[in-house]
Amino acid sequence: MQETGLTDEQICRLKFDLSVSQNLASGPINEIIVEIGKSFIGTDYAGHTLEDDGEEKLVINLRALDCVTFYENCVTLARCIKLKKTTFDDYKAQLQFLRYRSSLASGWCGQTYRPSSHAPCSASNPFIVAWTSSSRDSGK
C-alpha cells in the first residue's frame, strides 16, 4: 500500500488502522512485523534517510525507506501494536527506544542502528538483548 502525499503521522495512523482491521495485536510479533512490512510495498526507496546535518534529532520518514529504516519501522510499529500504544507519540517513543542507546542527547555515539554498534549496546538496550537472545534460542 503506497501512501502518496501523506504526512508521516498520517501514514503511521494508517498502519495502526490496518492493525485494528486485521486484529494484528492478537498475533505473535513476528507475524505483525510481516504484515506491517507488506503494507510498505510500493513505498519509495531513499538512501541515507537517517543522515541529517546539524544537531542530532529523531529523524522520521515513513514516506521513503532504506533497508535500515524499513526494518526499524516494521519493528517499531509492531511493538506499538503489540503494546497497544498506537498514537504517533507512542510510535516516536518506540522508535527512539529502538534507535538510541540512551537518549538523543548522546548524539551519534548513542545510535544503535549501525550494524557495528549493536554489539556494544546490547547490554544497555533491553530490546536488542531480548531480540538477540530470542534469535539465538530459536536457532536462527
Image: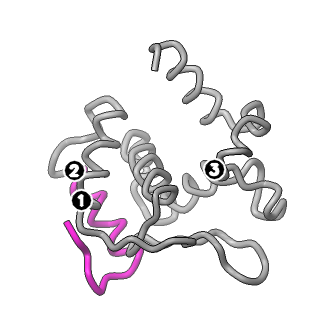
Identify the residue at horizontal 33%, vertical 71% (top origin). 11
Q: Please tell me which of labels 1 and 3 falls first in the chain.
A: 1
Three-letter amino acid code of the residue under disc 1: Asp
Q: Is residue 79 magenta?
A: no
Q: Please tell me which of labels 3 and 2 falls first in the chain.
A: 2
Three-letter amino acid code of the residue under disc 2: Val
Left/right placement of residue 86 relative to residue 126 reads left
Residue sitting nearer the eye, 26 or 138: 138
Residue sitting nearer the eye, 114 or 132: 114
Element type at mark 3? helix
What residue is shown with label 3? 97
Viewer-side label of 1, 3: 3
**Alpha carbon distance from label 1 to label 3:** 23 Å
Identify the residue at horizontal 58%, vertical 20% (top origin). 133
- Magenta range is 1-19
Could you tell me residue 12's position as x and y percent? 36, 66
Element type at mark 2? helix
In the image, is residue 64 above or below residue 91?
below
Q: Tell me if mark 2 has few (under 14), some (14-19) or many (20+) residues whose alpha carbon lies within 10 angstroms of its own.
A: few
Q: Tell me if mark 3 has few (under 14), some (14-19) or many (20+) residues whose alpha carbon lies within 10 angstroms of its own.
A: some
The image's mark for residue 20 is 2
What residue is shown with label 1? 17
Could you tell me residue 84's position as x and y percent? 39, 45
- Badges 2 and 1: C-beta atoms under 8 Å apart? yes
Number of marks drawn: 3
Viewport quadrant of the C terminus = top left
Three-letter amino acid code of the residue under disc 3: Phe
